[in-house]
Amino acid sequence: MNDRVAVFIDNGYLSKVLNDGTKIDFLKFCTAVSDRHERLRTYFYDCRPYVSDPPTEEERLKSAQYMKFAGKIEALPRFQMRFG
């Protein structure tokens, strides 16, 4: 039996069900759902915010904040962002 797992997170769905502003420690979350198994990788699926051409100031701000968030997720051990 193989004791390795991958974790898949759909941030769009997660944001909808946790629309109360709950903050999640994704590393702790993945450790908990992996249980006693080795976590090979976590794939974090999300969509970048819409940016028109030319972007508005609000779109630029949202995009910059999102890229900062995405960088933090990518910096977690064995995490990878997937954009759709």
Image (cartoon, grey):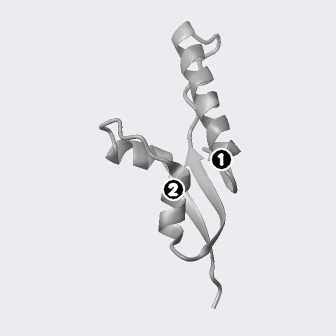
Q: Residue pushed farthest bottom?
A: 1
Residue shown at the point (61%, 12%) measured from the top left: 55
Q: Is residue 12 above or below residue 4?
A: above
Q: State left or right for residue 17 relative to residue 46.
A: left
Reply above or below: 13 against 22.
Answer: below
User: Identity of the amino acid at label 2?
Assistant: Lys
Instruction: Assess disc 2: are there few (<14), some (14-19) or many (≥20) residues with their C-alpha within 10 Å of its C-alpha.
Output: few
Q: Is residue 16 above or below residue 6?
A: above
Q: Is residue 73 above or below residue 49?
A: below
Q: Nearer the viewer, residue 50 or 14?
A: 14
> Which residue is nearer to you in this view: 24 or 81?
24
Task: Tell whether 23 sits left or right of 41.
Answer: left
Tell which residue pokes out farthest to the left in this image: 20
Residue 32: x and y in percent read 48, 65
> What number is the disc on residue 28?
2
Q: Nearer the viewer, mark 2 or mark 1?
A: 2
Q: Are marks 2 and 1 in contact (CB under 8 Å)?
A: no
Q: Amino acid at mark 1?
A: Met
Q: Is 23 placed left or right of 67 in the picture?
A: left
Q: Please state which of residues 20 and 12 is positioned toward the viewer in this rendering.
A: 20
The secondary element bearing badge 2 is classed as helix
The residue wearing badge 1 is: 81
- Which quarter of the figure has residue 70? top right
